[in-house]
Image: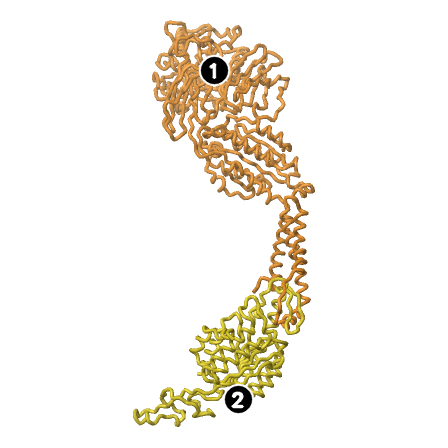
Amino acid sequence: MENYRKYLDPRTLAKLQGLELRARSIVEGYVTGAHKSPFHGFSVEFAEHREYVPGDDLRYVDWKAFGKTDRIYLKQYEEETNLVCYMLLDVSESMTYQSDEAPLSKLDYARCVAASLTYLVLQQQDGVGLTTFDKEVRAFIRPSTHPTHLKQLLHAMEVTPSAAKTSMGPIFHDLAERYKKRGVVVVLSDLFDDVGSLLAGLKHFRHRRHEVILMHVLDPAELDFPFRNMTMFKGLEGLPELLADPPSLRKAYLAEFEAFTKAVRQGCYARNIDYLQLRTDQPLDLAISTYLASRMNRVK
Amino acid sequence: MILGWLAAASAPIVIHLLNKRKYRETSWAAMQFLLAAVKKNSRRMQLEQWLLLALRTLLILLAVIAAAEPGFRGAEQLVASGERVHRVVVVDGSFSMNYRPTGQQSYFEQAQAVAERIVDNAREGDGLSLVVLGTPSRTVVGPPLFRKDEMRAIVEDLRQPHGAGNLPQCLNELDRLLSKSRDMHPQIRRRIVYFVTDLGKQTWEPADGARGADALAEFQARCERWGGDTAVSLIDVGAADAENSAIVSLEAAEPYAVVGLPTTLRAVVRNFGRQAKSRVPITLNVDGRKVEEKTIDLEPAGEATVEFDYPSTNVPRAPGATIYDVELGPDRLEIDNRRYLALETKPNLRVLVLREAIASEEEEYGFENLAAALKLRPGADLGGPSPVSVDVETDDVLQRRELKDYDCVFLVGVKRFTPSQAKILWSYVNEGGGLVTWLGPRVDAADYNKLLADGSERILPAKLGPLVEEAQYKLNPLKYEHPLVAEFRGSEQGNLLNTPVYRYFRLNDAERPQARRVLEFLNEAKDPFIVSEKIGAGRSLLVATSLQASWTTMPLSPGFVPIVQELVSYAAGGRTAGTSRIVGQPLDGAFRRTTAAAQVTVAIPADNAEPQPRRTLTTPTPSGTTTPPTAKLNPGPASAEVVPAGEFFRWSFAETPTSGIYAVTIAAAEQTTRPFAVNVDPRESELVKLASNRLTSLPWSTVPLHYSTDLQDFAEPARTFVASGESNPIHRWFLLGALVAAVAETLLAGRAGRGRR
């Protein structure tokens, strides 16, 4: 099983080590200073003192410090909590597409991202689970924090075969019922499905108070449509083939594709879902670290 | 050729169809979007595809047609024949074109080559004309010639004339030629005048005031008058200012030659260049034989006078026509290195003095004085017989003696003449004789005025007025402008101007525009003292006073001998001086009409060692005839005119395009041959070149001017002009169409997504 190591590209993981994965405030645990956390007192570590400003909760005033210095300081805590991360990996046939310009197929790229995140989450002693799907769920592995769990997850990613057409809506509804503990749901897919049903499924996760990160994996050819010569396009997932002059079609195709991505993006925004478009020709580490950095900024 | 291009035009269709057959395959994940795009755009895409195909085919088709423009032009010519051009070649024939740069052809030969090239480059249907700019300018081929081979032969036959260039006259010729061309060939709508020239300043911008400074502006204005259908192409064969030296004049000290006296010849040599020349040989040839050689040194822009005495020894020489030519050592321009002079050598100079039979002692003394003064010739052997023979006769000898043997006739105080005597004198003067009239106390002024000074057969240069008895002590030499007194300038001999004159006739020369005063009295009335006039071929002089001491003390003064000798020289010079011409000036003369018909033949000087052509000019009919003109320049057409005038035949021969000796033989009752010396105009020897920008910078508006120094490729600018000006613009529309199609293709292809990533 040496080849799953490729998902843990040292270059990628070296970058991730320096970053701290954080869920947003709604994930279990709380941000220091936010007195309304339902899980206060859980796994709290003192971090530093901060000067009191009116409105702060008096419970966190360090009275000992006040006695010594005659100034009011608050104790600040840096909490670490068990985060549960659910990876959802699309393994349908459309994900196997790889254009000439792309170094990896969309599926391979998505596996890399999933593996990186899995490793990272497990390094933080948090739990991570994995579900692969196409038109139905192919593999379902429950979350666990055990370090040996990583191997199992990677194996599941590797062996899961690509198959038929995607049908995400019903699967997401199903999974939303099955994920009992609130956590972060990371969806990795090209989303070539009915947008309405897809967004309905994602909304179900949100309804279950999960934080959802939608990673939209796309091939550069799908975004740019760079073909110049007469081309026979052979449809995947049972779609028909088409002989076309790409230059004359390009504009119309790009318009259609832009309408699709825009619908997804706007749907995500409306449901407070983080949307990230990943091009398979982008550096893997850059994609992930950029996203994580932006998430950290949002948390702080 | 065109069919091949049309086949090329079908290339887009073939490519289009081939494209449909040839494609690559790829699997595609985002098929749903592609299908949606096709569904929405299929109709528009199909339309765009066909439009693009049509545009590309059209583009190639139009470009091919536009490129095939020469073929089209040929076709248009068949239909409209509007493309024909009348090409007028003007070859500069001024003799500076004879300049031969080191190791090259002379400018004239280069100009011939250019003219041949113009002929060769002319298209079928083009008319060709040829004009030689010279003095006079000649239209060699006027009405357009349409046969190139014939024109070529004419150009090859051109010989360098020896005249200067007369541009205004050449433009007159061109005016006539072009307007005739327009009238006779209205189907030829364009004209090009090619000037092939060395741009000699003497031709294009002569220094003399007459056609002076505005010559260039005048040239431009004249060309502009030809109108917009005429283009002017200036092909410059000349290099920058060149070195040259020339003999600018050759004269005999005396206008006649006699056996017993050596002839003194004066040649003036001028260096027109900027470099000094040393030990330049200068040779005197007499009748073609080398007689004497000297060497001279010439300063830059300097002049040197060389005198030759011939014969230099006491070798007796034969009487008859003698031809002198002086030749300067060779340089790059040969024509002006030689100058000719034709002079009749007489056994002696014969002078007839006519007087009244009865004369006072004082008068006799005067006659003796005159005869003595006439016989004294400077340089003559005093001990030997005088080279001048003087016959003193009474006036009645006029009826009996043939005057034409005399070189000069003096009338001294003759009272009156009979009409027949007057007639004899008139004939004598008209044929070239010299007449000197002294007045006297017996002179009947009314009779003189009636018979000698009035009417068409007059021989006196002024009418006689009243006798003036006021003593005059001063004479005005009138700046010594008259050749008779020119010798006195600066070295006035014998105090001539202070001679007292006690009595004189007031001469009236007001009605004689041809008369010239030699000397006049320095009084308020400015009465003339000596007046001269050329009458026919001869010369007549009138002195206002008498030889008697009671009228003037002149015969006693030291100035008397020189003035008498000058009077004779000048009067007798009529016969000899009439034989010198500048190239382009006509030869002319008169001879007595003793027979019903006469024949004049002119031997034209041999040119370029060609056999000397002999041309019979005329056999006069009662009205005179002309010879039929030919197209060749040299030997030129003989447009001689022989006009019977009273008891004379007047003849003239205009064609003197080259320098040299023209031997004119007059065959009437007896046959006489007179040589004429024709020399080049020394002004043309100054090889200063006109800066070409003087011409090109003129404000040419209606007539375009093309200037070129490239003798190989000169035709191109002219032809470009012709093409742009005269060609039918259809091909340009095709080109424009192709351009529009190209732009439309780019736009449409852009719209269809081609070329954008």
**Three-letter amino acid code at the position of disc 1:** Gly
- The residue lying toward the viewer, choosing from B141 and B493, is B141
Q: How many marks?
A: 2
- Residue B288 disc label: 1
- The residue lying toward the viewer, choosing from B669 and A251, is A251
Is there CB contact under 8 Å for labels 1 and 2?
no
Q: Chain of mark 1?
A: B
Please state, as top left, top right, bottom left or bottom right, where the C terminus of chain B lies in the image.
bottom right
| Left or right: where B91 falls relative to B243 | right
Q: Which residue sits at x=43%, y=31%? A: B242
What tint does the image give chain A? Answer: yellow
- The chain shown in orange is which? B
Q: Which residue sits at x=64%, y=53%? A: B60
Q: Chain of mark 2?
A: A
* Residue B218 visible, this angle: no
| Left or right: where B236 falls relative to B76 | left
Farthest residue to the left: give it.
Answer: A68
Residue to which mark 2 is pinned: A181
Crowding around mark 1 (Cα neighbors within 10 Å: few <14, some 14 to 19, many 20+) is: few
Q: Is residue A28 above or below residue B609?
A: below
Q: Which residue sits at x=44%, y=83%? A: A300
From the viewer's perspective, is the residue at label 1 or at label 2 nearer?
2
| Left or right: where A163 falls relative to B507 | right
Q: Secondary structure at mark 1?
A: loop
**Three-letter amino acid code at the position of disc 2:** Lys
